Image (tube, grey):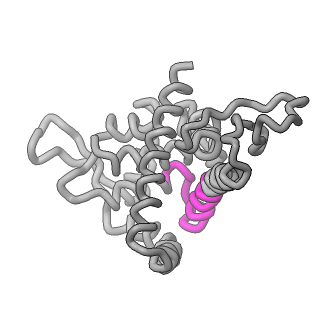
Amino acid sequence: MDDARKAGGMAGTASGDGKGDADGADGTGGSGGTGGPAAGGATGLGHPYERAPHDAGGSSATETGGYHRKSTGDAERDLLLQRVATAGRELGLGLLALNAAAAKAIGTHPTDAWIISYVQTLPADSPLSPGELAKLTGLTTGAITGVIDRLEKAGYVRRERDTVDRRKVIVVPTEAAVTIGRVFQPMVEAQLQLALNYSKEELAAIVTYLESSIKVAEATVERLRKM
């Protein structure tokens, strides 16, 4: 499974409650959602975050929203690292709110909205099976079946036989799935305009950081799922 799908899986997990139950997911990003430590606390900085004790108040640790890490010895760098961690956490929470708002706009569940958005952005030759979607989102196979049933009934997706392996069932978006794409389009355009403010070198650094952060988030989700 490629990095793009893994990244999509992380976003999908943020839509649910992290417990593998689609019907209980409300977009709040619970224990397995990327709105939690995976989005803000664990940011790929190379400095593990721990809960800050109430009497931490000393100068050897930098507090970040209830977490702290050891100082690098460079006050300016420490401040920037803190800002990166805080921004990462706020971005994670913002994406949760965005998905919930988009779901409300098209009259569906946050988990359903994310899956509609995700399957319609996949290349036509790379559809996913229900089992693969379950793995990406962290939902049980029973829960993902319920999600797909709802989406199929609403006309957003359909089940088909894989043209390569006829034993495999895949989930394919319908024309109606473009509805949620239109909901996100203004944000996509705004993000593009924002990106144009940065040089190629700066964009390369941003991409490297984000891709590394995705790997940290994936590792965190895997650890939490084993707890």
Q: Please name the residue shown 43% across and 69% down the image.
A: 181
Is residue 11 found left or right of 121 in the rendered image? Answer: right
Quadrant of image for the C terminus: top right
Give coordinates of residue 187: x percent, y percent. Answer: 52, 73
163 or 200: nearer the eye? Answer: 200
Which quadrant would residue 123 be assigned to in this image?
bottom left
- Can residue 100 be seen in the rendering of this structure? no
Q: Please name the residue shown 38% across and 64% down the image.
A: 177
Is residue 137 found left or right of 88 in the rendered image? Answer: left
Q: Please name the residue shown 28% across and 45% down the image.
A: 2
Magenta residue check for 135: no
Q: How many numbered discs sit on the rendered protein? A: 0
Span colored in magenta: 92-112
User: Furthest-top residue in view?
Assistant: 227
Is residue 135 found left or right of 23 in the rendered image? Answer: left
- Can residue 67 be seen in the rendering of this structure? yes
Give coordinates of residue 106: x percent, y percent. Answer: 54, 66
Determine whether 22 is above or below 210 in the image. above
Give coordinates of residue 32: x percent, y percent. Answer: 57, 35
Which quadrant would residue 95 be assigned to in this image?
bottom right
Which quadrant would residue 162 be assigned to in this image?
top left
18 or 68: nearer the eye? Answer: 68
Magenta residue check for 103: yes
160 or 51: nearer the eye? Answer: 51
154 or 135: nearer the eye? Answer: 135
Q: Please name the residue shown 44% across and 40% down the image.
A: 215
Quadrant of image for the N terminus: top left
Give coordinates of residue 78: x percent, y percent. Answer: 69, 48
User: Furthest-left residue in view?
Assistant: 164
User: Furthest-front residue in view?
Assistant: 73
Determine whether 186 is above or below 156 in the image. below
